[in-house]
Image (cartoon, helix red, strand yellow):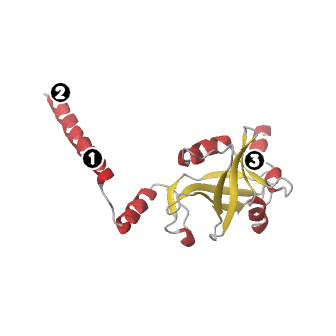
Amino acid sequence: MEQKKAKKIDHEEYKEIYGAALCISSFKHLILSPESAMNLQASLQATIDIPRVPSLNGLIGRCSQPFEKQLTETDVNSKQCRLSINKVDVENAVMPLLKEEEDVEKGIRVKVYDANGKEYPMTLKLWAHKLHVLKEGWIEFCTDHALLAHQDFLKLWVFRNLHTQDLCFFITSRRLQEFQPIKKRRLNA
């Protein structure tokens, strides 16, 4: 008798799952009004930690989960003019948002926004087949925010502009009273 009850539950679950799948598959033929599209986008983004910046309202399309980076000496060196990004963070946050025709080895023009919504044009590029960097407008961003090695920690989001489909970054910073790389200090502790 218990076995029949278990089968009934499985059958009910199956009906629910099938109904949901049928509903979702019908969406591909649905044409949404602009208002409905914005509402749907907002509800989808509710599951992701999306930057809350008034000047970016309505611009953020597909968006990555944020990742953090402690700035290094080379990140703030005005002669190097680039922000290096960890390979794992690029694989998790950037690669899923790339279009087929975009190639990080050749470089991708991106727009980077700060917490005030100011736009900084930059290029995302893979250097020497091993180091992902944001370059060209990085030093202006660094100077405008008086960023310091080891003390400043960046939080980065990667997203597609909802209107232009351009690849964009949103970056905030916070300062801690650290004077050495945290990772290296942990290794030595």
Foreground of the two, 23 or 184: 23
The outermost residue toward the left is 1
The answer for how far apart the CA atoms under marks 1 and 3 are is: 46 Å
What residue is drawn where x is 19% and y is 40%? Answer: 12
Question: Number of labelled discs?
Answer: 3
What residue is drawn where x is 45% and y is 55%? Answer: 47
Q: Residues within 10 Å of mark 2 (few under 14, many from 20)?
A: few
Label placed on residue 3? 2
Label placed on residue 141? none
What residue is drawn where x is 60% and y is 58%? Answer: 168
Mark 3 lies on a secondary structure that is helix
Give x and y (percent) for residue 15.
20, 41
Which of the two labelled residues, at mark 3 and mark 2, occupies the earlier sequence position?
2
Q: Which residue is mark 3?
A: 182
Residue type, numbered disc 2 = Gln
The C terminus: image quadrant: top right
Q: Residues within 10 Å of mark 3 (few under 14, many from 20)?
A: few
The outermost residue toward the front is 101
Q: Is residue 76 left or right of residue 36?
A: right
Give x and y (percent) for residue 142.
77, 62
